[in-house]
Structure formats: C-alpha cells, structure tokens
Amino acid sequence: MNKVRKDWNEIKTNDSWAIFKIMSEFVEAYEKMAKIGPCISIFGSARTKDHDEYYKIGTEIAQKLSQKGYGIITGGGPGIMEAGNKGAQAGGGQSVGLNIDLPFEQNCNPFIDPQHNLQFDYFFVRKVIFVKYSQGFIILPGGFGTLDELFEALTLMQTKKINRRPFVLVGSDYWSGLIEWIKRTMLEKENNINEKDLELFTVVDDADEAIEFIDDFFKIHSFTPNF
C-alpha cells in the first residue's frame, strides 16, 4: 500500500508541472490565431482518400469559402483535413492546421500555410482553439474524433457557452442514421434534448448548399468572438 501511495504522489507532482506546458500551448495558439480573420472549421476523417467524393466536396467547400474571405481551420492531418487546407490555398485564403502528435495516422498535410501550422500535445487545448476562433463548422464524414468535435461544438451552442454558429453536416447518406437516432431515441423516446436543439444544425449534400447556408446565416448574424 505504501508503494502505491508513493507512486501516486509522484504522479500528482508531475501533473502539477504539466500545467506550464498546457499554458504554453494556449499562449502560443492565442497569439497566432488572434491575427487571423474570420475562419470556418472543417472536420472529417483522416482516412478519406483524395479520390473520395467527400474529399472533393471538402476541397470545393474550402475553396469557395476562402474566395469569400474566410480562413479555413482543420486538424492539420490527411484526409478531409488535407482537403480543407488544399481548398483554402486554391481559393487564396488562409490555411490553418491545428496538428496533434499521435502514434499513428496524423502527419501534417502539405497545404497548411507554414506560419499557420500549430502543434499540440493536448486534445482539449486543440479543441478550445477550434471553437474559439471559428465562425462556423463544416462536418464531413469521419470517425470517433469527428463525432467528438461535432458534439463538443453542438453542446457549447446548446448550452449557450458560445454564440450560435452555422453548423453544417455534409452527406445525408452518412449522417441520416445518426440523426434518426437523435430524433427517435434521444428526443422522442428519452426526452434528453429539446426539439429546438435540432435547429442547431443542417444537413446538405453539396458544396453550394453549404456555402448558401453560411451566407444566409451571416445576413442576419454578426461576426463576434466565441468567448
């Protein structure tokens, strides 16, 4: 028992020093991101190949948003993230990558502006930066990480911790099962959300629909800091 307590106390001591590393990630990201104008975050799978239809749609969305003056923020890796950064550069916009060190599948894609390539060790710091500096969210098909980012942003809007933002799910075939479960089980059967919460997002199937939704949103809403 004494050895267990000794080991645990050493862990807690190391945790205290980790605070300084966490602070440094926040400070560096805040200083770099504050210099960039309004941005849209694009989420999606790192495993999507460049010949996939969703890769092409992601690239097109990012390019058209960039041509309208938005910066594009992605997780900095391959797949849909690469598509977003590729579209940003093609559209002449600012291309931001919030890269994180992972034991597999995460490598910086070549379409991030060098001055906007940020490195993170902590997922939670990275997610704060995604939300703080995004004026909208585009979610393409992805896995657990994409769902984590999706529900994090929705929860913050639902609880009014951030202002309402355009929130677009791309691909009705991909998202229809999840949305049906949210409606039938989460809402109607268990009453765990309000019907109005379903208005926090929309579902589209092509780039022009996504752009139109964001344009319409900002005809009646202003650009404001998230927190």
Image (cartoon, rainbow, N blue to C red):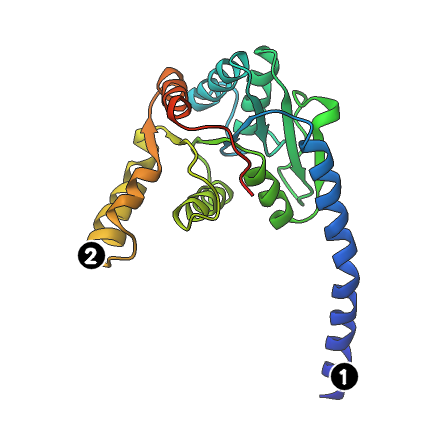
Query: Does residue 199 lie above or below 222 as drawn?
Result: below
Question: Circle 2 sits on which residue?
Answer: 189
Could you give the CA–CA distance between mark 2 and mark 1, rounded to whole angstroms? Answer: 49 Å
Residue corresponding to mark 1: 3
| 7 or 193: nearer the viewer | 193
User: Which residue occupies 48% across, 48% down?
Assistant: 161
Residue 79 can be seen in this image: no
Q: Is residue 96 left or right of residue 148?
A: right
Mark 1 Cα shell of 10 Å, populated few (<14), some (14-19), many (≥20): few
Q: Which residue is found at the position 50% from the left and 28% from the top?
A: 223
The residue nearer to you, when weighing 66 against 37, is 37
Q: Which amino acid type is shown beneath numbered disc 2?
A: Lys
**Residue 167, picture quadrant:** top left
Local secondary structure at mark 1: helix
Q: How far across and down, in percent of the image, does residue 102 sit?
A: 66, 44
Residue 96: assigned label = none
Q: Dot 2: within a 10 Å radius of its alpha carbon, few (fewer than 14), some, or many (20 or more) residues?
A: few
Helix or strand or loop: what does disc 2 sit on?
helix
